[in-house]
């Protein structure tokens, strides 16, 4: 990576009670020689916190690591770290159990440096199911290049993917965390902050999807998204939805010039089904008609994206032997994830290094 990357990019790694996964990520970053500033934001209990602090000291000679413990939930701790500790013009988040490809991250950063109308950029996100015969597949991603914030908003709502792990302009992502922290509660309804974070990136600017493997994420039983319900407080679904609609409509109106009432109607047309927690839509999703139509629409959109925009026809299933996965970083990521699917315990560290 570029020698001056530490002046341009901060890699933020949130972690909570998972030192084995954090160690595995440190082993990876040390071997690929990541040159960015690395900011750990830790909310672990005392025992795991002590292990993480020891680990930071252990790897400090190989990586530019800064560590901070913040006893708060995910959204609040990320807001705090963005407001107080991230000083580079660009930043990128990485989960403690995932891997980012350094060359793809650098490519995304360089694209943003020459494209001021874009808020964030990323490449192909690959998911590896270590608990399901190591099946590997690409997550759907595409560029959002329309000049209209409303059209970008509608497009993302209709063909969803998360921009959470994109390379961002730091001021834009800081504001997104602020707005999300002040207007949502992931303990009551996880889905609304997830939508807010991604849609705020879309309303604030265009989004670029670049060819090439960008990250490798692991699907396992400890994934937070797999064990946390989308809406836990079902009794107050309408109240939670209305709170989300008001802040999202306000942001959309400000970025697009639409009236607030018109922006509310747009949000309702895209996300109104969440008033009941998505119960009616969940029942509809189980029908054969819905599934067939959804697959036809998905394949059509992917084809149009390849023909008109990014020139990348993304296959759903991916093999570790594919040419797209041939880089040293990508092969190392696969090797570590397959060999240590539960992370690297301290006693196994010498063998992994």
Image: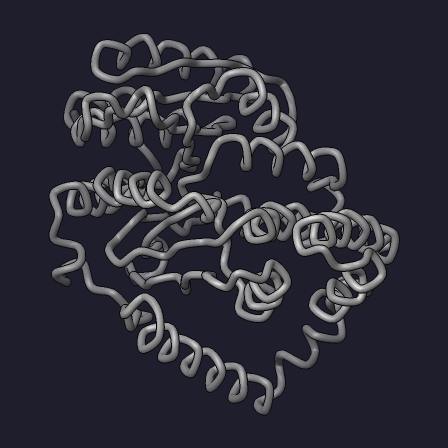
Query: Which residue occupies 38% across, 29% down?
Result: 11
Q: For this view, does 121 lie left or right of residue 329? A: right
Q: Nearer the viewer, residue 176 or 148?
A: 148
By what rule are the colours in the image chosen? one colour
Image quarter where the C terminus lies is top left
Labels in figure, total: 0
Q: Tell me if residue 352 can be seen.
A: no
Q: Tell me if residue 41 can be seen.
A: yes
Measured along the vertical axis of the image, is residue 337 above or below residue 310? above
Q: Nearer the viewer, residue 108 or 92?
A: 108
Image quarter where the N terminus lies is top left
Q: For this view, does 210 lie left or right of residue 351? A: right
List x then y, in percent, for residue 29: 25, 29
Query: Which residue occupies 45% across, 54% down?
Result: 207
List x then y, in percent, for residue 166: 42, 45
Residue 349: image quadrant is: top left
Query: Which residue occupies 60% across, 58% down?
Result: 149
Q: Which residue in the rendered view is the most extreme toward the bottom? A: 289
List x then y, in percent, for residue 75: 63, 33
List x then y, in percent, for residue 110: 29, 40
Q: For this view, does 206 lie left or right of residue 315? A: right
Residue 278: image quadrant is: bottom right
Q: Nearer the viewer, residue 188 or 39?
A: 39
Q: Nearer the viewer, residue 1 or 40?
A: 1
């Amino acid at each position: 990576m570029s020698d001056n990357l530490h002046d341009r990019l901060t890699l933020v790694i949130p972690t909570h009670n998972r030192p084995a996964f954090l160690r595995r990520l440190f082993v990876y970053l040390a071997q690929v020689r990541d040159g960015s500033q690395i900011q750990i934001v830790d909310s672990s209990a005392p025992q795991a916190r002590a292990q993480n602090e020891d680990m930071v000291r252990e790897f400090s000679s190989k990586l530019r690591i800064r560590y901070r413990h913040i006893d708060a939930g995910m959204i609040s701790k990320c807001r705090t770290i963005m407001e107080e500790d991230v000083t580079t013009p660009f930043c990128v988040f990485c989960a403690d159990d995932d891997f980012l490809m350094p060359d793809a991250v650098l490519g995304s950063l360089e694209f943003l440096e020459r494209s001021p109308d874009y808020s964030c950029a990323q490449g192909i996100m690959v998911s590896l199911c270590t608990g399901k015969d190591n099946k590997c597949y690409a997550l759907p991603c595409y560029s959002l290049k329309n000049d209209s914030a409303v059209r970008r908003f509608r497009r993302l709502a209709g063909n969803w993917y998360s921009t959470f792990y994109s390379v961002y302009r730091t001021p834009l992502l800081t504001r997104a965390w602020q707005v999300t922290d002040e207007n949502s509660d992931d303990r009551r309804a996880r889905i609304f902050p997830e939508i807010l974070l991604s849609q705020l990136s879309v309303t604030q600017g265009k989004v670029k999807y670049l060819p090439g493997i960008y990250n490798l994420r692991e699907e396992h039983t400890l994934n937070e998204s797999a064990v946390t319900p989308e809406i836990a407080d079902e009794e107050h679904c309408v109240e939670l939805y209305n709170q989300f609609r008001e802040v999202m409509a306000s942001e959309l109106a400000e970025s697009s010039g639409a009236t607030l009432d018109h922006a509310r109607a747009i949000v309702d047309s895209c996300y109104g089904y969440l008033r009941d927690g998505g119960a009616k839509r969940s029942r509809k999703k189980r029908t054969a008609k819905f599934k067939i139509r959804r697959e036809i629409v998905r394949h059509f959109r992917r084809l149009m994206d390849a023909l008109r925009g990014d020139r990348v026809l993304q296959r759903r299933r991916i093999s570790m032997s594919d040419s797209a996965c041939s880089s040293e970083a990508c092969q190392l990521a696969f090797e570590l994830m397959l060999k240590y699917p539960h992370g690297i315990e301290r006693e196994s560290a010498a063998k992994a290094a």
